[in-house]
Image (spheres, helix red, strand yellow):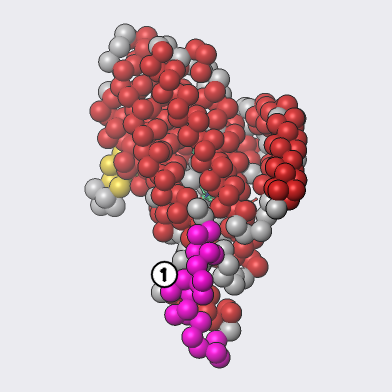
Amino acid sequence: MYTQSMDLPGGTPERSAFEGREDRTDQDRFDAKLRADHKIEAQDWMPAAYRKTLVRQISQHAHSEVVGMLPEGNWVTRAPSLKRKAILLAKIQDEGGHGLYLYSAAETLGTSREQMVDALLSGQSKYSSIFNYPTPTWADIGAIGWLVDGAAIMNQVPLCRCSYGPYARAMIRICKEESFHQRQGFDIMLTLCRGTPEQKAMAQEALNRWWWPVVMMFGPSDSASIHSAQTMQWGIKRISNDDLRQKFIDATVPQIELLGLDLPDPALRWNAERGHYDHGPIDWSEFKRVLDGDGPCNRERIAARVQAHEQGAWVREAALEHARRQRERQTKAA
Ligand code: FAQ
């Protein structure tokens, strides 16, 4: 699916348009494609640093989807009704699917799934800070869908226009599914807010717990973001960390008000001059601590992935053996 254009004889029309001039270097053709807002495809020449950056970002994104299944998985057996359990199971399965599309998109760049998974399990590769927080109540599941998926959509819609074709195409389907996830989370919150005072208090506590980690999820401020300038120049990132964070806050405050919950940051205030909400200072030392492996659940999350990987070894071995036998049978039959 991600590399369809590799199968076209003579390459894509886009490719030939940019390859007509003999005197152009690979770099010139790459730059011209970016300027014309054409997609870079897996078979195209690309600078080594562009490839490396994409593998870093896409694999981190894939790991986030897979590790992101854990906080919600914690509630599958305790969802308050059969309907909520079925919806939660479907959502978690979607996140696993997103991880698979993204690993496939990253594999088109020449890095194997094994290499990427090893980098996650050995702690060399990051995953989103947000999944290092616990889910002590059912309201946390509502808050994850509403806020975490809401933030993910804000960040990922611009990635549908990313310059690397396989990543951009994977993001289109992922965004559609995240949109359903966001609504189911808001629906959980709405039900709790219209329920008993205890249920509404549970929703408020979950909002207070998740607000700052979600605000941090967009990454360091623009002045501290080491990759943004280059990734924006390459058309990987289209909107900066701070601008996305602001868009998310502006979209979410009216939703908090609609739920009838208190704002989780006393400094949140509409600034008519700027046309945006102002917010309080972000505790970047907490963000750094979580990235450095010392968040509330970092160790638990990696331990759960290592255990799942070890326990799944027999499945990988069986699948490889099955494929080997099939090849053997086909060779004999030929
Ligand atoms: N967590 O220079 P920048 C989801 C790292 S999917 C951990 O600004 P960049 C779905 C960054 O990697 C959520 N690390 O970097 C779901 C870099 O470190 P490095 C994931 C972070 O790449 C919902 C360093 O800081 N989404 O939620 C974080 O330009 C519910 C410097 O930062 C994506 O991955 C962080 N929050 O911008 C699943 C989207 N922020 O690599 C289950 C794609 C920054 O040099 C349940 N990724 N860092 O060691 C992106 O858009 C970008 O990579 C950013 C970071 C915006 C995350």
| Residue 245 seen in this snapshot | no
Residue under the image location 27 percent in, 23 percent down: 260
Which image quadrant for residue 188? top left
Magenta region:
3-24
Residue under the image location 40 percent in, 11 percent down: 81
Single out the residue that lies furthest toward the bottom: 23
Q: Up-down: is 187 above or below 27? A: above
In the image, 109: left or right of 83?
right
- Give the x, y percent position of residue 113: 67, 47
Which image quadrant for residue 37? bottom left
- Closer to the camera in the image, 79 or 12: 12
In the image, 39: left or right of 105?
left
In the image, 312: left or right of 26?
right
Residue kind at label 1, given as amino acid type: Asp
Q: Disc 1 marks which residue?
A: 37
Single out the residue that lies furthest toward the front: 333
- Closer to the camera in the image, 259 or 79: 79
Instruction: Name the secondary structure under disc 1.
Output: loop
- Give the x, y percent position of residue 179: 36, 38
Is 250 one of the magenta-colored residues? no
- Give the x, y percent position of residue 55: 62, 55
Residue under the image location 50 percent in, 64 percent down: 5
Residue under the image location 32 percent in, 24 percent down: 187
